Image (tube, rainbow, N blue to C red):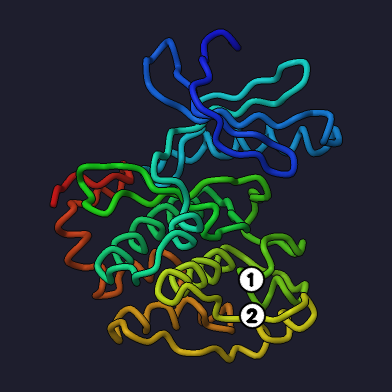
Amino acid sequence: MESRYVVKQYMSRGAQAETFVALDTESDVQVILKLTHKADLTVNQQNQLLREAQLQRKISSEFVVKVLNAYETASDIVTVLEFAPFGDFETQIQKRSAPFDESAIITWAMQLLLGLKHTHSNNIIHRDVKTANIVLIQDDKFPNAKAMLCDFGIATENNLAKTVVGTPYYMSPQACKGLNYGQKTDIWALGVVLYRLCTFEYPFFAGNQIALRARIASGVFQEVKGYSEELTGLINRMLEQNEALRPEAEELLKDPIFESRLRHFKYNEDADTVEGTQ
């Protein structure tokens, strides 16, 4: 298995994993190799990584990064992922000085909601939707590249969860308080992502976790400026404090802001693909 993938370029190193661009010699396409070192993990964490790969393989959405393969070596757990040449949203935000175009943000929102709709239909909560876990891939159907969800490492195959996980700035009020939460916690996190794309800031910010959780629980944030009422209204709906009132992905996709795009791109609900061009 190891001989199948030829490493071409080093990408990055995190706390427990390294990523590389590699060539799959069987398919002759570029892929991402994520090498997580067993020495840095407990047995439970190793099992969690393998579980992530299994969960992600279950999700066959055009807007979720595909896990192409996963295997173990003596020293590493290797996950083979679809190649994302444009990196993640967080990298794009850090490099950018000019605001993102509204049309691009709306199209990305549509794509990510389609990805979440498919994920949630499989009774999976991502639980760590954030700018660093959304990558951009070239696709001729979309002039601004295609946004895709990735990194299901703390996903759960349930409709209801209680464990406090995720990146603090993206945590829903329910997760912050240790209350039961459902798939709509991902909708809240996507609202934070869209807010960041519009402002380069977090809607809720504080110097420590206790203060941050209090800020999130307050529900008070600075309104997005410089964008249409339709887009800011969409973000506000996602950042609804009351989970019962917060829309699901399927409901949000019925928002008029997406109507022309879904029609233009000829969304195929059964296959979870879009067929149009622009």
Whether the residues at callouts 2 and 1 have beta carbons within 8 Å, the answer is: yes
Residue under pointer 2? 205
Q: Residue at x 50, y 32 (%)?
A: 81
Residue 197 picture quarter: bottom left
Q: Amino acid at mark 1?
A: Tyr
Would you call the spot at circle 2 few (<14 residues within 10 Å), some (14-19), or many (20 or more)?
some
Foreground residue, 203 or 273?
Answer: 203
Q: Residue at x 66, y 29 (%)?
A: 35
Residue under pointer 1? 169
**Residue 6 screen position, x and y as percent:** 51, 15
Foreground residue, 20 or 249?
Answer: 20
Q: Amino acid at mark 2?
A: Phe
Would you call the spot at circle 1 few (<14 residues within 10 Å), some (14-19), or many (20 or more)?
some
**Residue 195 screen position, x and y as percent:** 46, 75
Q: Secondary structure at mark 2?
A: loop
**Residue 149 screen position, x and y as percent:** 48, 50
**Residue 95 screen position, x and y as percent:** 44, 59
Q: Secondary structure at mark 1?
A: helix
Foreground residue, 184 or 148?
Answer: 148
- Mark earlier in primary sequence (2, 1): 1
Q: Residue at x 35, y 56 (%)?
A: 111
From the viewer's perspective, tell me whether residue 227 is left or right of residue 78.
Answer: left
Residue 13 picture quarter: top right
Q: Residue at x 75, y 29 (%)?
A: 37
The residues bearing labels 2 and 1 have C-alpha atoms spaced at a distance of 7 Å
From the viewer's perspective, tell me whether residue 255 is left or right of residue 121.
Answer: left
Residue 151 picture quarter: top right
From the viewer's perspective, tell me whether residue 244 is left or right of residue 206.
Answer: left
Quadrant housing the N terminus: top right
**Is residue 160 positioned above or below 188 on the image?**
above
